[in-house]
Image (cartoon, rainbow, N blue to C red):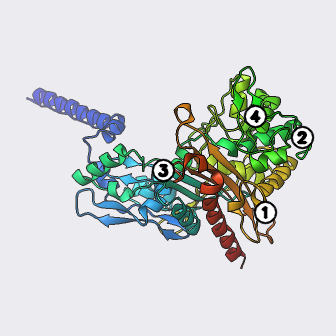
Amino acid sequence: MIRYIRRAAALCLILLAALLVNAARVMVIQADQLDDNPANRRIAITRWGQPRGEILVDGRPVTGARDSGQQLRYERTYTQGPLYAPVTGYASQTYGTTLIENAEDPVLSGTDPMLAPLPLWNDLSRAPRPGGKVVTTIRARMQEAAYRGLDGKRGAVAAIEPASGRILALVSSPSYDPGALSGTGPTVKESWRLLNTSPHQPMLARAFRQTYPPGSTFKIVTAAAALDAGVVTDPDAPTRTPDPFVLPGTRQVLPNEATGCANASLAYAIQWSCNTVMAGLGVKVGLEGMLDTVENFGFNDTGLRIPSWVAKSNFDTSMSADQLALSSIGQFDTAATPLQMAMVAAAVANNGEIAHPYLVDRTTTAGGTTVTTTGRRTYHQAMRPSTATRLQDLMVRAVEDGTGTNAAIPGARVGGKTGTAQHGLGNTGTPYAWFIAWAQAPDSAQPAVAVAVVVEDAEANRTDISGGGDAAPIARAVMEEGLRLEREGRG
Protein backbone atom coordinates (compact mmCIF):
# COMPACT_ATOMS: atom_id res chain seq x y z
CA MET A 1 0.00 0.00 0.00
CA ILE A 2 2.82 2.36 0.96
CA ARG A 3 4.49 1.57 -2.37
CA TYR A 4 1.41 2.77 -4.28
CA ILE A 5 1.24 5.92 -2.20
CA ARG A 6 4.88 6.61 -3.00
CA ARG A 7 4.25 6.09 -6.67
CA ALA A 8 1.25 8.41 -6.59
CA ALA A 9 3.27 11.02 -4.71
CA ALA A 10 6.12 10.74 -7.22
CA LEU A 11 3.66 11.15 -10.08
CA CYS A 12 2.18 14.22 -8.40
CA LEU A 13 5.65 15.67 -7.97
CA ILE A 14 6.41 15.05 -11.64
CA LEU A 15 3.13 16.71 -12.64
CA LEU A 16 3.85 19.63 -10.31
CA ALA A 17 7.32 20.02 -11.78
CA ALA A 18 5.84 19.94 -15.27
CA LEU A 19 3.38 22.67 -14.28
CA LEU A 20 6.21 24.79 -12.85
CA VAL A 21 8.34 24.27 -15.97
CA ASN A 22 5.42 25.21 -18.20
CA ALA A 23 4.63 28.27 -16.07
CA ALA A 24 8.28 29.34 -16.29
CA ARG A 25 8.23 28.80 -20.04
CA VAL A 26 5.13 30.96 -20.42
CA MET A 27 6.21 33.67 -17.97
CA VAL A 28 9.89 33.93 -18.94
CA ILE A 29 10.65 32.42 -22.32
CA GLN A 30 7.41 33.32 -24.07
CA ALA A 31 6.70 36.56 -22.18
CA ASP A 32 7.84 38.93 -24.91
CA GLN A 33 6.11 36.91 -27.61
CA LEU A 34 2.83 36.92 -25.70
CA ASP A 35 3.16 40.62 -24.86
CA ASP A 36 3.53 41.42 -28.55
CA ASN A 37 0.66 39.19 -29.61
CA PRO A 38 -2.07 41.37 -31.19
CA ALA A 39 -4.68 39.32 -29.38
CA ASN A 40 -3.28 40.36 -25.99
CA ARG A 41 -5.35 43.34 -24.87
CA ARG A 42 -3.76 43.68 -21.43
CA ILE A 43 -0.86 45.80 -22.68
CA ALA A 44 -3.18 48.23 -24.47
CA ILE A 45 -5.59 48.36 -21.53
CA THR A 46 -2.73 49.18 -19.16
CA ARG A 47 -1.19 51.65 -21.61
CA TRP A 48 -4.39 53.64 -22.06
CA GLY A 49 -5.63 53.11 -18.51
CA GLN A 50 -4.12 56.42 -17.40
CA PRO A 51 -3.64 59.81 -19.12
CA ARG A 52 -0.47 60.31 -21.14
CA GLY A 53 1.97 62.94 -20.00
CA GLU A 54 1.84 66.40 -21.52
CA ILE A 55 3.84 67.97 -24.33
CA LEU A 56 4.62 71.60 -23.48
CA VAL A 57 5.19 74.71 -25.59
CA ASP A 58 6.30 77.85 -23.74
CA GLY A 59 5.47 76.08 -20.48
CA ARG A 60 1.86 75.35 -21.46
CA PRO A 61 0.49 71.93 -22.48
CA VAL A 62 -0.60 71.50 -26.09
CA THR A 63 -1.89 67.99 -25.36
CA GLY A 64 -4.35 66.52 -22.89
CA ALA A 65 -6.52 63.48 -22.21
CA ARG A 66 -10.23 62.59 -22.36
CA ASP A 67 -11.90 59.84 -20.35
CA SER A 68 -13.77 57.85 -22.98
CA GLY A 69 -15.37 55.46 -20.47
CA GLN A 70 -14.31 52.58 -22.71
CA GLN A 71 -11.96 49.67 -22.08
CA LEU A 72 -9.11 51.76 -23.51
CA ARG A 73 -10.00 54.51 -21.14
CA TYR A 74 -8.02 57.69 -21.87
CA GLU A 75 -7.81 59.15 -25.38
CA ARG A 76 -5.25 61.77 -26.37
CA THR A 77 -6.49 65.31 -27.03
CA TYR A 78 -4.68 68.20 -28.70
CA THR A 79 -4.87 71.95 -28.16
CA GLN A 80 -4.57 73.75 -31.51
CA GLY A 81 -3.91 70.36 -33.08
CA PRO A 82 -3.20 71.46 -36.66
CA LEU A 83 -0.77 74.16 -35.48
CA TYR A 84 1.41 71.75 -33.51
CA ALA A 85 0.85 68.48 -35.42
CA PRO A 86 4.31 68.63 -37.11
CA VAL A 87 5.80 68.82 -33.61
CA THR A 88 3.66 66.45 -31.54
CA GLY A 89 2.61 63.89 -34.13
CA TYR A 90 -0.29 61.70 -33.00
CA ALA A 91 -0.86 59.09 -30.27
CA SER A 92 -3.60 56.79 -31.50
CA GLN A 93 -5.15 53.77 -29.80
CA THR A 94 -5.64 52.36 -33.30
CA TYR A 95 -2.62 53.48 -35.34
CA GLY A 96 0.22 53.94 -32.85
CA THR A 97 2.42 56.99 -32.40
CA THR A 98 4.54 59.38 -34.49
CA LEU A 99 7.05 62.23 -34.03
CA ILE A 100 7.49 63.37 -30.39
CA GLU A 101 4.61 61.13 -29.30
CA ASN A 102 6.71 58.24 -30.62
CA ALA A 103 10.26 59.37 -29.83
CA GLU A 104 9.36 60.23 -26.22
CA ASP A 105 6.72 57.53 -25.71
CA PRO A 106 8.40 55.89 -22.69
CA VAL A 107 8.32 59.23 -20.83
CA LEU A 108 4.80 60.18 -21.92
CA SER A 109 3.35 56.73 -21.19
CA GLY A 110 5.07 56.49 -17.79
CA THR A 111 7.12 53.39 -18.61
CA ASP A 112 10.56 55.03 -18.64
CA PRO A 113 12.55 53.66 -15.64
CA MET A 114 14.01 57.16 -15.17
CA LEU A 115 10.60 58.34 -13.94
CA ALA A 116 10.74 56.00 -10.92
CA PRO A 117 11.85 57.45 -7.58
CA LEU A 118 14.28 54.54 -6.98
CA PRO A 119 16.08 52.01 -9.24
CA LEU A 120 13.96 48.93 -9.98
CA TRP A 121 10.98 50.64 -8.33
CA ASN A 122 8.66 49.79 -11.24
CA ASP A 123 9.64 46.11 -11.12
CA LEU A 124 9.07 45.89 -7.38
CA SER A 125 5.88 47.94 -7.05
CA ARG A 126 4.19 46.84 -10.28
CA ALA A 127 2.22 50.10 -10.04
CA PRO A 128 1.87 52.23 -13.18
CA ARG A 129 3.75 55.50 -13.05
CA PRO A 130 2.07 58.75 -14.16
CA GLY A 131 3.23 59.88 -17.57
CA GLY A 132 6.06 62.41 -17.61
CA LYS A 133 6.20 65.72 -19.46
CA VAL A 134 8.13 66.70 -22.59
CA VAL A 135 9.20 70.34 -22.75
CA THR A 136 9.81 71.45 -26.34
CA THR A 137 12.00 74.25 -27.68
CA ILE A 138 9.16 75.67 -29.81
CA ARG A 139 8.14 79.31 -29.29
CA ALA A 140 4.39 79.68 -29.68
CA ARG A 141 4.38 83.11 -31.30
CA MET A 142 6.92 82.12 -33.92
CA GLN A 143 5.00 78.92 -34.66
CA GLU A 144 1.79 80.92 -35.05
CA ALA A 145 3.46 83.50 -37.32
CA ALA A 146 4.72 80.76 -39.62
CA TYR A 147 1.35 78.99 -39.69
CA ARG A 148 -0.51 82.24 -40.46
CA GLY A 149 2.00 83.11 -43.15
CA LEU A 150 1.51 79.87 -45.06
CA ASP A 151 -2.26 80.34 -44.73
CA GLY A 152 -3.11 76.82 -45.86
CA LYS A 153 -0.77 76.79 -48.86
CA ARG A 154 1.34 73.68 -49.30
CA GLY A 155 4.71 74.39 -47.77
CA ALA A 156 6.77 74.46 -44.62
CA VAL A 157 8.77 76.65 -42.25
CA ALA A 158 11.70 75.74 -40.01
CA ALA A 159 13.33 78.21 -37.63
CA ILE A 160 16.44 77.65 -35.47
CA GLU A 161 18.35 79.58 -32.84
CA PRO A 162 21.78 79.56 -34.55
CA ALA A 163 23.96 79.60 -31.44
CA SER A 164 22.22 76.70 -29.66
CA GLY A 165 20.44 74.62 -32.30
CA ARG A 166 17.10 74.99 -30.52
CA ILE A 167 14.25 74.56 -33.04
CA LEU A 168 11.97 77.56 -32.54
CA ALA A 169 9.29 76.84 -35.14
CA LEU A 170 8.41 73.78 -37.21
CA VAL A 171 5.32 74.20 -39.39
CA SER A 172 3.86 72.10 -42.18
CA SER A 173 0.89 73.12 -44.29
CA PRO A 174 -1.78 71.99 -44.90
CA SER A 175 -2.01 70.29 -41.52
CA TYR A 176 -4.50 68.09 -39.66
CA ASP A 177 -5.92 67.53 -36.18
CA PRO A 178 -4.14 64.56 -34.54
CA GLY A 179 -7.09 64.23 -32.16
CA ALA A 180 -9.17 62.80 -34.99
CA LEU A 181 -7.01 59.65 -34.79
CA SER A 182 -6.83 59.28 -31.01
CA GLY A 183 -9.50 56.69 -30.26
CA THR A 184 -11.01 53.62 -31.90
CA GLY A 185 -14.03 52.88 -34.03
CA PRO A 186 -15.45 53.74 -37.46
CA THR A 187 -14.99 57.51 -37.13
CA VAL A 188 -11.27 57.16 -36.48
CA LYS A 189 -10.88 54.72 -39.36
CA GLU A 190 -12.69 57.10 -41.72
CA SER A 191 -10.49 60.00 -40.61
CA TRP A 192 -7.42 57.85 -41.25
CA ARG A 193 -8.66 56.94 -44.72
CA LEU A 194 -9.42 60.55 -45.66
CA LEU A 195 -6.08 61.84 -44.38
CA ASN A 196 -4.09 59.15 -46.18
CA THR A 197 -5.91 59.53 -49.50
CA SER A 198 -5.83 63.35 -49.57
CA PRO A 199 -3.70 64.67 -52.46
CA HIS A 200 -2.50 67.45 -50.12
CA GLN A 201 -0.83 64.94 -47.74
CA PRO A 202 -1.75 66.77 -44.52
CA MET A 203 0.02 64.22 -42.29
CA LEU A 204 3.37 64.75 -44.05
CA ALA A 205 5.76 66.68 -41.79
CA ARG A 206 7.11 68.73 -44.66
CA ALA A 207 9.52 70.78 -42.53
CA PHE A 208 11.83 67.81 -41.93
CA ARG A 209 10.38 64.75 -43.67
CA GLN A 210 9.99 66.18 -47.22
CA THR A 211 12.83 67.20 -49.53
CA TYR A 212 12.59 69.76 -52.33
CA PRO A 213 15.00 71.08 -54.94
CA PRO A 214 16.38 74.07 -53.01
CA GLY A 215 16.97 76.21 -56.09
CA SER A 216 18.99 79.35 -55.62
CA THR A 217 19.04 79.14 -51.81
CA PHE A 218 21.67 76.42 -52.38
CA LYS A 219 23.97 79.05 -53.89
CA ILE A 220 24.99 79.94 -50.33
CA VAL A 221 26.46 76.44 -49.99
CA THR A 222 28.26 76.74 -53.33
CA ALA A 223 29.58 80.17 -52.35
CA ALA A 224 30.94 78.70 -49.11
CA ALA A 225 32.68 75.95 -51.08
CA ALA A 226 34.21 78.47 -53.51
CA LEU A 227 35.49 80.71 -50.71
CA ASP A 228 36.84 77.85 -48.59
CA ALA A 229 38.58 76.28 -51.59
CA GLY A 230 40.17 79.57 -52.65
CA VAL A 231 38.39 79.52 -56.01
CA VAL A 232 37.13 82.98 -54.98
CA THR A 233 39.43 85.18 -52.92
CA ASP A 234 37.69 88.52 -53.46
CA PRO A 235 33.85 88.37 -53.50
CA ASP A 236 33.73 91.68 -55.40
CA ALA A 237 36.13 90.60 -58.17
CA PRO A 238 34.87 89.40 -61.58
CA THR A 239 34.58 85.62 -61.85
CA ARG A 240 35.28 85.33 -65.59
CA THR A 241 32.03 83.46 -66.11
CA PRO A 242 30.43 84.03 -69.53
CA ASP A 243 26.78 84.70 -70.20
CA PRO A 244 25.44 82.76 -72.03
CA PHE A 245 26.98 79.85 -70.14
CA VAL A 246 27.03 76.48 -71.90
CA LEU A 247 26.88 73.51 -69.54
CA PRO A 248 30.18 71.56 -69.83
CA GLY A 249 30.13 68.76 -72.39
CA THR A 250 26.73 69.79 -73.78
CA ARG A 251 25.12 72.37 -76.03
CA GLN A 252 22.62 73.37 -73.38
CA VAL A 253 22.67 77.03 -72.41
CA LEU A 254 21.99 77.86 -68.76
CA PRO A 255 19.67 80.88 -68.53
CA ASN A 256 19.67 83.73 -66.02
CA GLU A 257 16.59 85.48 -64.69
CA ALA A 258 18.80 88.39 -63.64
CA THR A 259 20.65 90.80 -65.91
CA GLY A 260 24.29 91.82 -65.71
CA CYS A 261 25.55 88.32 -64.84
CA ALA A 262 28.28 88.15 -67.49
CA ASN A 263 31.64 88.02 -65.69
CA ALA A 264 29.83 89.11 -62.52
CA SER A 265 31.37 88.90 -59.07
CA LEU A 266 30.30 86.45 -56.38
CA ALA A 267 28.76 89.36 -54.47
CA TYR A 268 26.63 90.38 -57.45
CA ALA A 269 25.68 86.73 -58.11
CA ILE A 270 24.34 86.32 -54.55
CA GLN A 271 22.67 89.73 -54.55
CA TRP A 272 20.80 89.16 -57.82
CA SER A 273 20.94 85.34 -58.04
CA CYS A 274 23.02 84.69 -61.17
CA ASN A 275 22.75 81.05 -62.23
CA THR A 276 25.72 81.18 -64.58
CA VAL A 277 28.23 82.47 -62.03
CA MET A 278 27.29 79.96 -59.35
CA ALA A 279 27.16 77.01 -61.75
CA GLY A 280 30.60 77.96 -63.05
CA LEU A 281 32.00 78.23 -59.53
CA GLY A 282 30.63 74.80 -58.63
CA VAL A 283 32.44 73.29 -61.63
CA LYS A 284 35.67 75.07 -60.66
CA VAL A 285 35.46 73.79 -57.08
CA GLY A 286 34.95 70.27 -58.45
CA LEU A 287 32.90 67.36 -57.24
CA GLU A 288 35.23 66.37 -54.40
CA GLY A 289 35.37 69.90 -53.01
CA MET A 290 31.62 70.36 -53.31
CA LEU A 291 30.99 67.05 -51.55
CA ASP A 292 33.25 68.03 -48.66
CA THR A 293 31.31 71.25 -48.18
CA VAL A 294 27.77 69.92 -48.61
CA GLU A 295 28.38 67.07 -46.18
CA ASN A 296 29.74 69.54 -43.63
CA PHE A 297 26.42 71.35 -43.95
CA GLY A 298 24.53 68.09 -43.31
CA PHE A 299 23.64 66.84 -46.78
CA ASN A 300 23.69 63.04 -47.29
CA ASP A 301 23.34 62.46 -43.52
CA THR A 302 20.92 59.59 -42.83
CA GLY A 303 21.40 59.67 -39.06
CA LEU A 304 20.09 63.09 -38.04
CA ARG A 305 17.52 62.98 -35.20
CA ILE A 306 15.71 65.88 -33.49
CA PRO A 307 14.69 63.40 -31.75
CA SER A 308 12.44 62.08 -34.59
CA TRP A 309 14.30 60.96 -37.70
CA VAL A 310 14.93 63.55 -40.41
CA ALA A 311 14.78 62.83 -44.14
CA LYS A 312 18.17 62.81 -45.87
CA SER A 313 18.96 65.93 -47.89
CA ASN A 314 20.65 64.81 -51.09
CA PHE A 315 23.66 65.87 -53.12
CA ASP A 316 24.78 63.20 -55.59
CA THR A 317 28.20 61.68 -55.00
CA SER A 318 28.85 60.84 -58.66
CA MET A 319 28.11 63.34 -61.45
CA SER A 320 29.28 64.61 -64.80
CA ALA A 321 30.46 68.22 -65.07
CA ASP A 322 27.14 69.48 -66.48
CA GLN A 323 25.22 67.72 -63.71
CA LEU A 324 27.55 69.26 -61.13
CA ALA A 325 26.89 72.71 -62.62
CA LEU A 326 23.13 72.24 -62.22
CA SER A 327 23.51 70.71 -58.75
CA SER A 328 25.53 73.75 -57.68
CA ILE A 329 22.50 75.97 -58.22
CA GLY A 330 20.16 73.63 -56.35
CA GLN A 331 18.78 71.75 -59.33
CA PHE A 332 19.36 68.31 -60.95
CA ASP A 333 19.09 65.75 -58.09
CA THR A 334 19.93 68.17 -55.28
CA ALA A 335 17.17 68.08 -52.65
CA ALA A 336 16.85 69.48 -49.14
CA THR A 337 14.41 69.63 -46.27
CA PRO A 338 13.41 73.08 -45.00
CA LEU A 339 15.17 72.15 -41.74
CA GLN A 340 18.39 71.51 -43.67
CA MET A 341 18.19 74.91 -45.37
CA ALA A 342 17.52 76.58 -42.01
CA MET A 343 20.74 74.90 -40.87
CA VAL A 344 22.52 76.45 -43.87
CA ALA A 345 21.33 79.93 -42.82
CA ALA A 346 22.24 79.16 -39.19
CA ALA A 347 25.77 78.15 -40.20
CA VAL A 348 26.33 81.53 -41.84
CA ALA A 349 24.86 83.33 -38.84
CA ASN A 350 26.91 81.31 -36.32
CA ASN A 351 30.39 81.90 -37.81
CA GLY A 352 30.37 78.68 -39.80
CA GLU A 353 29.42 76.29 -37.00
CA ILE A 354 26.16 74.34 -37.01
CA ALA A 355 24.83 73.50 -33.57
CA HIS A 356 22.99 70.17 -33.56
CA PRO A 357 19.28 70.98 -34.02
CA TYR A 358 16.94 69.69 -31.32
CA LEU A 359 13.26 69.91 -30.51
CA VAL A 360 13.05 68.59 -26.93
CA ASP A 361 14.57 70.86 -24.29
CA ARG A 362 14.03 68.46 -21.38
CA THR A 363 11.77 65.77 -19.97
CA THR A 364 10.32 65.76 -16.44
CA THR A 365 8.25 63.66 -14.12
CA ALA A 366 4.55 64.45 -13.76
CA GLY A 367 5.48 66.62 -10.80
CA GLY A 368 8.02 68.64 -12.78
CA THR A 369 11.31 67.10 -11.61
CA THR A 370 13.80 67.11 -14.48
CA VAL A 371 14.62 63.66 -15.84
CA THR A 372 16.75 64.45 -18.89
CA THR A 373 18.07 67.64 -20.46
CA THR A 374 19.25 68.16 -24.04
CA GLY A 375 22.60 69.91 -24.02
CA ARG A 376 24.06 72.01 -26.78
CA ARG A 377 26.51 70.18 -29.01
CA THR A 378 28.28 70.88 -32.27
CA TYR A 379 26.94 69.15 -35.38
CA HIS A 380 29.54 70.29 -37.94
CA GLN A 381 31.88 73.15 -38.74
CA ALA A 382 30.38 73.89 -42.13
CA MET A 383 32.93 76.50 -43.25
CA ARG A 384 35.73 78.68 -41.99
CA PRO A 385 34.66 81.58 -39.74
CA SER A 386 36.13 84.05 -42.24
CA THR A 387 33.99 82.53 -44.99
CA ALA A 388 30.88 82.85 -42.82
CA THR A 389 31.68 86.52 -42.16
CA ARG A 390 31.93 87.20 -45.89
CA LEU A 391 28.68 85.36 -46.57
CA GLN A 392 26.92 87.34 -43.85
CA ASP A 393 27.82 90.54 -45.72
CA LEU A 394 26.68 89.09 -49.06
CA MET A 395 23.35 87.93 -47.64
CA VAL A 396 22.80 91.35 -46.02
CA ARG A 397 23.35 92.98 -49.42
CA ALA A 398 20.74 90.68 -50.97
CA VAL A 399 18.19 91.93 -48.43
CA GLU A 400 19.17 95.60 -48.41
CA ASP A 401 19.42 95.96 -52.18
CA GLY A 402 18.76 92.73 -54.03
CA THR A 403 16.21 89.98 -54.47
CA GLY A 404 15.40 89.70 -50.75
CA THR A 405 14.16 93.19 -49.89
CA ASN A 406 10.78 91.82 -48.72
CA ALA A 407 12.57 90.30 -45.71
CA ALA A 408 14.02 93.58 -44.43
CA ILE A 409 13.20 94.44 -40.80
CA PRO A 410 13.70 98.08 -39.77
CA GLY A 411 16.42 98.42 -37.14
CA ALA A 412 17.66 94.82 -37.52
CA ARG A 413 20.50 93.28 -39.49
CA VAL A 414 18.97 90.70 -41.82
CA GLY A 415 20.71 88.45 -44.32
CA GLY A 416 18.79 86.34 -46.81
CA LYS A 417 18.74 84.44 -50.07
CA THR A 418 15.84 83.81 -52.40
CA GLY A 419 15.22 80.67 -54.41
CA THR A 420 12.88 79.60 -57.17
CA ALA A 421 13.22 75.86 -57.73
CA GLN A 422 12.07 74.29 -60.98
CA HIS A 423 10.49 70.85 -60.86
CA GLY A 424 8.13 68.54 -62.72
CA LEU A 425 8.43 66.94 -66.14
CA GLY A 426 10.41 69.34 -68.30
CA ASN A 427 10.32 71.86 -65.42
CA THR A 428 6.68 72.57 -66.25
CA GLY A 429 5.45 72.38 -62.65
CA THR A 430 4.76 75.51 -60.65
CA PRO A 431 8.19 76.41 -59.17
CA TYR A 432 8.75 76.15 -55.44
CA ALA A 433 9.33 79.53 -53.79
CA TRP A 434 12.16 79.46 -51.23
CA PHE A 435 13.70 81.91 -48.80
CA ILE A 436 16.40 81.39 -46.19
CA ALA A 437 17.48 84.11 -43.79
CA TRP A 438 18.78 85.10 -40.37
CA ALA A 439 18.16 88.20 -38.25
CA GLN A 440 20.17 90.02 -35.60
CA ALA A 441 19.06 92.83 -33.29
CA PRO A 442 21.28 95.92 -33.32
CA ASP A 443 22.12 95.54 -29.62
CA SER A 444 22.73 91.79 -29.76
CA ALA A 445 26.09 90.03 -30.11
CA GLN A 446 24.70 87.29 -32.37
CA PRO A 447 21.70 86.54 -34.60
CA ALA A 448 18.58 85.43 -32.77
CA VAL A 449 17.01 83.25 -35.45
CA ALA A 450 17.67 81.52 -38.75
CA VAL A 451 14.73 80.46 -40.89
CA ALA A 452 13.86 78.60 -44.07
CA VAL A 453 10.53 78.85 -45.89
CA VAL A 454 9.29 76.88 -48.88
CA VAL A 455 5.94 77.47 -50.61
CA GLU A 456 4.86 74.74 -53.02
CA ASP A 457 1.76 76.34 -54.51
CA ALA A 458 2.30 80.08 -54.51
CA GLU A 459 -0.72 81.90 -55.91
CA ALA A 460 0.84 83.69 -58.84
CA ASN A 461 1.55 83.24 -62.50
CA ARG A 462 4.47 80.91 -63.07
CA THR A 463 6.72 83.70 -64.29
CA ASP A 464 5.93 85.86 -61.24
CA ILE A 465 6.68 83.33 -58.53
CA SER A 466 9.78 84.05 -56.53
CA GLY A 467 11.18 83.32 -53.12
CA GLY A 468 11.38 87.06 -52.53
CA GLY A 469 7.70 87.57 -53.31
CA ASP A 470 6.09 84.53 -51.72
CA ALA A 471 8.41 83.13 -49.07
CA ALA A 472 10.35 86.17 -47.80
CA PRO A 473 7.34 87.88 -46.12
CA ILE A 474 6.67 84.68 -44.14
CA ALA A 475 10.32 84.51 -43.07
CA ARG A 476 10.21 88.17 -42.06
CA ALA A 477 7.14 87.62 -39.85
CA VAL A 478 8.82 84.68 -38.09
CA MET A 479 12.07 86.60 -37.60
CA GLU A 480 10.21 89.62 -36.24
CA GLU A 481 8.65 87.43 -33.56
CA GLY A 482 12.03 85.91 -32.81
CA LEU A 483 13.61 89.33 -32.34
CA ARG A 484 10.69 90.48 -30.22
CA LEU A 485 10.98 87.43 -27.95
CA GLU A 486 14.72 87.98 -27.59
CA ARG A 487 14.12 91.62 -26.65
CA GLU A 488 11.46 90.65 -24.09
CA GLY A 489 13.77 88.01 -22.64
CA ARG A 490 16.47 90.61 -22.06
CA GLY A 491 13.97 93.08 -20.63
Look at the numbered disc 4 and give the secondary structure of its residue.
helix
Q: Earlier in the sequence, mark 4 or mark 2?
A: 2
Q: Is residue 209 visible?
A: yes
The residue sitting at 82% across, 33% down in the picture is: 242
Calculate the distance from the C-alpha at mark 3 to the C-alpha at mark 2: 48 Å
- Other-residue count near label 3 (Cα within 10 Å), few / some / many at <14 / 14–19 / ≥20: many
Q: Amino acid at mark 3?
A: Leu
Which residue does the numbered mark 2 point to in the structure image?
Answer: 238
Position above or below: 20 against 44: above
The residue sitting at 85% across, 53% down in the picture is: 389
Position above or below: 316 against 169: above
Residue 78 x %, y %: 40, 63
Instruction: Tell me how many marks there are.
Output: 4
Which quadrant, please, contains the C terminus? bottom right
* 3 and 1 marks in contact (CB < 8 Å): no
Which residue does the numbered mark 3 point to in the structure image?
Answer: 99
Q: Is residue 131 visible?
A: no
Marking on residue 446: 1
Look at the numbered disc 2 and give the secondary structure of its residue.
loop
Q: Amino acid at mark 4?
A: Ala
* 4 and 1 marks in contact (CB < 8 Å): no
Q: Earlier in the sequence, mark 1 or mark 2?
A: 2
* 3 and 2 marks in contact (CB < 8 Å): no
Position above or below: 250 against 442: above
Calculate the distance from the C-alpha at mark 1 to the C-alpha at mark 2: 31 Å
Q: In this orientation, which residue lies closer to the viewer: 131 or 423?
A: 423
Q: Amino acid at mark 2?
A: Pro
